[in-house]
Image: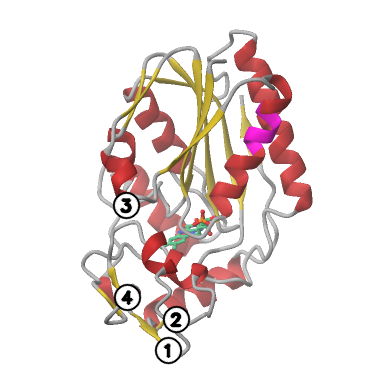
Amino acid sequence: MKKIHLAYFSPSGTTEKIVRGIADGIKDVFPNSPVEMIDLLNPKTRKDRHIFGSDELVVFGCMTAQKLFTLSDEMFASLEGHDTPMIGIVSYGNGFYGIALKELLKRATERGFLVAAAGAFPAQHSISSTIGPGRPDASDMETIRAFGRKAAEKIGSGDLNLHTQLQTNWSHVDEFNKIIAMRESQPDAPYVLPESYKTKEISDACIQCGICANYCPTEAIDVSRKSFDLNKCIGCWGCINRCPRHAIRSTSREMADIMTSFGSAFAEPLKPETFF
Ligand SMILES: Cc1cc2nc3c(=O)[nH]c(=O)nc-3n(C[C@H](O)[C@H](O)[C@H](O)COP(=O)(O)O)c2cc1C
């Protein structure tokens, strides 16, 4: 394998951790292949074109928000495969991943990739640290590494076909299944979080270090004014989770209410799912 590329969209860092764990497993099989990072959180990286050949391997990872995410158009437009093997995964907050894996497969295939293995990995929910707390944990990381190894062995043997059909992932809760059904019937409808779900404030603990702005995928934060442009903000929670001083907090009543019902419905820890 000429090169292994890790392309990931990971506002709060769990998807990146999973993708790196997969790379550890791949390196068990291809120890001499160099690894390159493509951080799709960075707007400039998403504008660049990344072109891959059939002798390279791309690991693509994205957080789930019912579907992949608001920026999936932009992300996939920047990636161009030429019969390039891909391992595609989504992370999700121990609830449901809906159509995210199906969407990943469709988009990756349209962009010239051959998805040979896929996975959905429960992680700590970016909006509530009490849902899936601490995940992916050590046991998840072992599973993730083993998945990477098995996928690399499969690809190394020349088998680039996905033999399992990826399905919509339903939850056990009617309220949430309605949302998933809507996504399933309109997979191309944009995912837009209403502004009232994105309101937040910065406290006096802020020292204007700029870390939040560095991790903002849409350049929505004005650090000098300690303000947010909610038209640009996509509500990924990266700024809130990355702030070393915990100075940013959500002020959305609607989001707090949803998360209360989400937390009680999805308290049971879910298991990673892998597809070959
Ligand atoms: C706006 C938003 C919507 C989300 N929707 C879902 C969801 O539908 N189901 C779920 O299980 N987790 C959901 N999550 C949780 C994230 O998918 C999960 O925490 C993910 O692992 C975050 O990845 P990251 O740490 O790489 O940012 C959502 C998170 C955000 C911010």
What distance separates the C-alpha of mark 4 from that of mark 2?
Answer: 15 Å
Q: Nearer the viewer, mark 2 or mark 3?
A: 2
Badge 2 vs badge 3, beta-carbon distance below 8 Å: no
What distance separates the C-alpha of mark 4 from that of mark 3?
Answer: 23 Å
Badge 4 vs badge 3, beta-carbon distance below 8 Å: no
Q: Nearer the viewer, mark 4 or mark 1?
A: 4
Q: Which residue is mark 4?
A: 223
Total residue callouts: 4
Residue kind at label 1, given as amino acid type: Ser
Residue kind at label 3, given as amino acid type: Thr
Mark 4 closeness class: few <14, some 14–19, many ≥20 residues within 10 Å: some
What distance separates the C-alpha of mark 3 from that of mark 1?
Answer: 28 Å
Residue kind at label 4, given as amino acid type: Val
Q: Which residue is mark 3?
A: 70
Q: Which residue is mark 1?
A: 203
Q: Which residue is mark 2?
A: 249
Q: Position of residue 221 (x, y in %)?
A: 30, 70
Badge 2 vs badge 1, beta-carbon distance below 8 Å: yes
User: In terms of depth relative to the viewer, which is nearer, 101 or 177?
Assistant: 101
User: In terms of depth relative to the viewer, which is nearer, 159 or 57?
Assistant: 57
Disc 4 or 3, which lies upstream in sequence? 3
Q: Position of residue 69 (x, y in %)?
A: 37, 50
What distance separates the C-alpha of mark 4 from that of mark 1?
Answer: 12 Å
What residue is shown at x 23% (from left), y 72% (from top)?
229
Region rendered in magenta: 22-26
Q: Callout 2: helix, strand or loop?
A: strand
